[in-house]
Amino acid sequence: EDLTPLKDIYADHFYIGNAVGTNHFAGRDLEIMTKHHNLITAENVMKPEAYYDDQGNFTHSSQDAFLQNAVDKNLLVHGHVLMWHSQSEDSLYQNEDGSYKTPDEALANMKTHISKVMTSADAIAGDSLISWDVVNEALDGSFSNPEDWKSNLRQSSGWLQSIGDDYLYEAYKYAREVADSLGRHDMVLYYNDYNDHLQPKARTMYHMVKDINERYAEENPDDDRKLISGVGMQSHYTTSVNIENVRTSLERFIELGVDVGVTELDVGASNTTTLTEEEEKEQAYFYAQLFDLYKEHSDHMSRVTLWGLSDRHSWRSEDNPLLFDGNLQAKEAYYALQDTA
Ligand code: XIL
């Protein structure tokens, strides 16, 4: 059966992305990747931990291979991720005895990491690399006072523990500097987070980005760009999420005057390994409603990226959250997206 490519269906609206690994550049996975998508994110290989060997030395051969594959297949790339509390390299901010490095030491290591990752990726991917998640999932709190985002910062972040809450501003400022030095003045620097549909958290994200961007604007009156120029809604949903909440969050982020990206979309449909017909239909309807909402706002949205090519390789496999099933066949959700077009 010949399916219409998703990237063609939505060509007038946004890129269709997916999260992949080097192992997906073969066979049926590669077919789905290149037929339906024009943008990829590295599901794991560009995370901090993947850049360091057992001795803590920086290496980038597997990242180079991944990026070269993307370039060869004419796919754009979203860089994921420069700073995260998980899948990180602890030696950047922690001493061997577990104590945290001084703010100056950790800041210097942060800058070295950012500069090496961005520069090595640029050497392979160049203009194909259109954006970076600079900081991922920095927020984790009660969100009872969304304006006070600093009190909702994730305490388990080694960057927060070593540098303090200025690490966010410093990371974006430095990533902007590196991008500029590479001639990439248009580089989109994202803040990316999950539970983006929950209003207390979405409001906290909003205030964090707004404050950081206002500070940059005050300190850099000659630069009319936003420091944080993208907000990533990870969008790890289930069919019981209220789409009106997604709408409220999306519209709130658009108010920041930044690009809003759907960066890691998947929609859990069941908690058993097999989907019932009814669950598959419900999931298809949910996807269709979401994409209608995205299309409505596509002037402010550059991409919708799914988090996995098929239910076979999904990190939420047991929830069957994607558009292609365990045998890599199109599900109802795929056909529903074709119909919304
Ligand atoms: C997940 C990957 O899909 C898994 O393979 C890995 O074991 C853990 O990380 N938020 C993110 C992504 O920003 O990097 C995560 O990806 C999913 C949650």
Image (tube, helix red, strand yellow):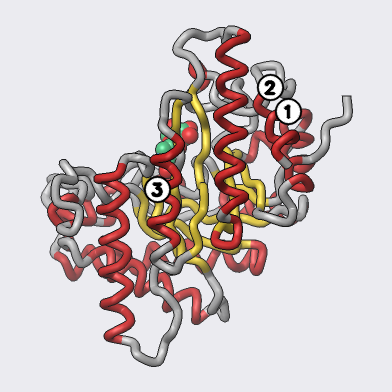
Q: Residue at x 28, y 63 (%)?
A: 168
The amino acid type found where label 1 is placed reads Tyr
Residue 332 is marked as 2
- Looking at the picture, tell me which residue is in the foreground, 284 or 50: 284
Q: Residue at x 23, y 48 (%)?
A: 157
Q: Residue at x 46, y 39 (%)?
A: 235
Q: Quadrant of the rendered structure where residue 121 is?
A: bottom right
Percent across and percent down for residue 3 are 83, 32
Query: Along the polypeptide, which appears first: circle 3 or circle 1?
Result: 3
Q: Which part of the image, by quadrant, shows the C terminus?
A: top right
In the shown orientation, is residue 260 left or right of residue 10? left
Above or below residue 136? Residue 32 is: above
Packing grade of label 3 (10 A; few <14, some 14-19, many >=20) is some
Percent across and percent down for residue 142 are 16, 41
Above or below residue 147? Residue 66 is: above
In the shown orientation, is residue 141 left or right of residue 294? left
